[in-house]
Structure formats: C-alpha cells, structure tokens
C-alpha cells in the first residue's frame, strides 16, 4: 500500500500547486531525491535541503549564499510532508526565502491533502479488489470456503444469506460496462470484473429477478456499446451462487448460438438447449441429429426447415404458423407431410415434434 510519495503523485502535487504559486516547486522522496519538479532538468537529483529536512524533521531554508555551497540546491524553502506523524517526502519552493516563506505552509498543506486523497483512493481500490476476490471465490467454489473468506465477508458487511441471482454482461469495453453496472447496484449487490465482462450477484431482498434484469437490459440497450446479458436462477444464499453463475454462462453460450440477434438470455428460457449442449458429445445424441441432416440434404431452399421452426415456435398451431409463413393451410399440411416422409417423424405428434425440435437444437449448438 502507498506510504511514500511516488513520481506520479509528486508531479501531480507540482502541477496543482504551480497553478496558484508563481515559483518552481520541487517534491523530494524519503531519500531526498527530486521526483517531481516544474524544472525538468532537476529531476532525479539529490536535494541537500531535503536531506536536512529529513534529518531534522522540520523546515529548512536555503539562502543564495548557502545554495552556492550545497549540491543540487537553489535558494528556497523546504518543508516536510507528513502522513500519520511520519515524514513521507519533502516539498520545496524555489526562490529567496524572504519572498516565498509565507507560501511555504500553504504548499505543504496542499501536498499533504493531495497525498491523503491518494491514500484514500488507494484504500478504496484495495477494498474493491478484496471484495472482488470474495466474489471470485463464490463463483468458483472449487473447494470449501476457508476462514479468511468469511473474515473478509464480515469485514465488508456482506450478508451471505440473502437471495441473489448471477448476471453476466459481456462487451468489448469491460470498464464501460462496469461503470454502467455500478449506477444501478444496491448496497447488498456484489460484482467483479471477468476476462470477458462483468458478473453481478444481484441481491433480491426487494423486487423480482425478472424486473431487475429487464431494467438492466434497458439501460444497456440505451448505451452506445454492443453487449450481451445473461441471467442464472435465483439462489437462496451464497452456497448456490456458483450454480447460478454457471447457469448464466450456459445461457449466454447457448443463447448466443440459437438467437445471436438477441441481447438477453435467461437460463429459465434455455434449460432444454443447455441440457443438450452439456450432453452434445454423447453418442446417443447423434441419431437425433440424423433427422436434421436428412431434412437439410433434401431441403435445398430451406422451406421445410423454416416451416418446422415456425411450427415449433407457434406451439403446433397450424393456423398461426401458416399466417406467419404467409402460406395456405393446405401448403402447411403438405410440408408437414413431406417432413414426415423424409425424417420418419410426424410433426403433428407431440413426441415426434419434440424429437425434431431436439434435432434442430443440436444442429445449432453442437
């Protein structure tokens, strides 16, 4: 954790203070080396005046006469920068002491405030990283959670026994996604950045899972970047969050193949395709694929495949399927007969239609 002044912070102090003080500012580290300056030629030089401040723990002024005899020094005023009673660096103002003395304390205070601000930011970022580590442990769940996990959860007041749902948002720019997600999180929500996106463990103590997912999708849709959103099932407590996360991953993988034009995939809508996807490599599934292969080989214009797909989407309702396809009911009947002739499966029978549906799914997700 940051406890001494870095070069980046030193230059930040220099730039801020020189906007209001009409003289050169130098910032030295705990070793008396100039690491920030309005005069780039002085960078990385040992500052004798800073060494005196570090040795005595108090301000040190350098007159023109003294500057002529000190290495790397010019006339000016040098003051310690304190944090929690410890000297973390030195700030120096270049000029005749009698002319700039009154500005010295102001610059020192400004330097300390900037340093404290950076410490606070770093502590917040450190806490964010630790909270994300808690989330990663919840998602992986490869081994029993240890005492350190529960200590961290307690430190951040994370209630592990709330109902939560895993949501995954993928996009080209993960940082933009994270900014957007943070705008719509509640106190008990947990989140972490993944290699390909952001995972949100949404607390559902108030409101429904579906309404929140719809709200988040709406905000994502209104953004300027392409995205994919998926959701797992609601879990009663932390023990099932890795399950919800895996469900969201599966819904994203399968949904992206079946409906690439969509932006949101819910596990509840893809349970059968996900089950097939998980078992797609098993030999018993291959026979079902043959139905689709036969249909594909015969159906060069893809009319029969389109008809079957629409017939399934309309739950076997012939009238609505025909209207959607812009064909006569007799034409639909002819095509369904043709599908039966080719595959040996009658789309009008529930069992046969289900097998044809599985064949279609396997063709897309295998």
Image (tube, rainbow, N blue to C red):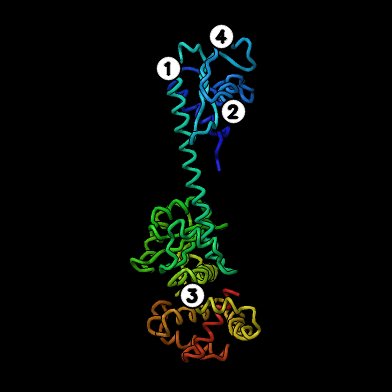
Q: CA distance from mark 1 to mark 2?
A: 24 Å
Q: Is residue 194 left or right of residue 17?
A: right
Q: CA distance from mark 1 to mark 3?
A: 71 Å
Quadrant location, the N terminus: top right
Q: CA distance from mark 2 to mark 4?
A: 23 Å
Q: CA distance from mark 3 to mark 2?
A: 58 Å
Packing grade of label 1 (10 A; few <14, some 14-19, many >=20) is few
Q: Observer-nearest residue: 24 or 67?
A: 67
Give the labeled residue for mark 4. Answer: 64
Packing grade of label 3 (10 A; few <14, some 14-19, many >=20) is some
Q: Is residue 241 left or right of residue 295?
A: left
In the picture as drawn, the residue positioned furthest to the left comes out as 207
Q: Give the image location of residue 59, x and y in percent.
A: 51, 21
Badge nearest the viewer, 1 or 3: 1
First in sequence: mark 3 vs mark 2? 2
Q: Give the image location of residue 83, x and y in percent.
A: 49, 34
| Residue located 47% across and 58% down the image | 191
Badge nearest the viewer, 2 or 4: 4
| Residue located 38% across and 60% down the image | 218
Give the labeled residue for mark 3. Answer: 270
Q: Give the image location of residue 298, x and y in percent.
A: 60, 82
Give the labeled residue for mark 1. Answer: 102
Badge nearest the viewer, 3 or 2: 2
Asked whether the viewer can see residue 107, the reply is yes
Give the labeled residue for mark 2. Answer: 35
Badge nearest the viewer, 1 or 2: 1
Q: Give the image location of residue 353, x and y in percent.
A: 50, 87
- Give the image quarter of residue 321: bottom left
């Amino acid at each position: 954790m940051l406890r001494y002044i870095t070069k980046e912070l030193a230059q930040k102090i220099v730039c801020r203070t020189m906007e209001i003080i009409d003289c050169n500012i130098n910032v030295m580290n705990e070793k008396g080396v100039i690491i920030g300056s309005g005069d780039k030629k002085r960078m990385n030089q040992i500052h004798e005046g800073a060494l005196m401040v570090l040795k005595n723990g108090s301000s040190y002024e350098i007159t023109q006469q003294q500057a002529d005899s000190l290495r790397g020094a010019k006339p000016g005023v040098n003051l310690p920068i304190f944090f929690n009673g410890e000297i973390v660096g030195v700030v120096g103002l270049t000029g005749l002491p009698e002319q700039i003395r009154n500005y010295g304390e102001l610059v020192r205070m400004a330097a300390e405030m900037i340093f404290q601000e950076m410490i606070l930011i770093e502590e917040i970022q450190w806490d964010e990283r630790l909270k994300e580590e808690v989330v990663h442990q919840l998602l992986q769940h490869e081994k029993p959670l240890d005492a350190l996990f529960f200590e961290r959860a307690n430190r951040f007041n994370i209630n592990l026994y709330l109902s939560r749902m895993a949501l995954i948002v993928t996009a080209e720019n993960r940082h933009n996604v994270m900014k957007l997600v943070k705008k719509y999180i509640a106190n008990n929500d947990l989140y972490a950045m993944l290699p390909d996106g952001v995972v949100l463990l949404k607390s559902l103590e108030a409101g429904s899972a579906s309404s929140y997912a719809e709200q988040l999708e709406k905000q994502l849709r209104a953004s300027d970047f392409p995205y994919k959103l998926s959701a797992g099932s609601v879990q009663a407590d932390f023990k099932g969050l890795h399950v919800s996360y895996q469900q969201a991953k599966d819904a994203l993988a399968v949904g992206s193949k079946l409906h690439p034009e969509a932006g949101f995939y819910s596990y509840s809508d893809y349970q059968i395709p996900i089950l097939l996807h998980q078992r797609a490599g098993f030999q018993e599934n291959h026979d079902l694929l043959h139905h689709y292969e036969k249909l594909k080989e015969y159906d060069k214009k893809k009319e029969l495949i389109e008809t079957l797909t629409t017939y399934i989407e309309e739950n076997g309702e012939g009238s609505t399927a025909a209207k959607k396809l812009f064909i006569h009911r007799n034409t639909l009947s002819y095509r369904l007969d043709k599908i039966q002739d080719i595959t040996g499966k009658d789309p009008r029978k529930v069992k046969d239609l289900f097998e044809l549906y599985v064949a279609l799914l396997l063709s897309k997700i295998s």
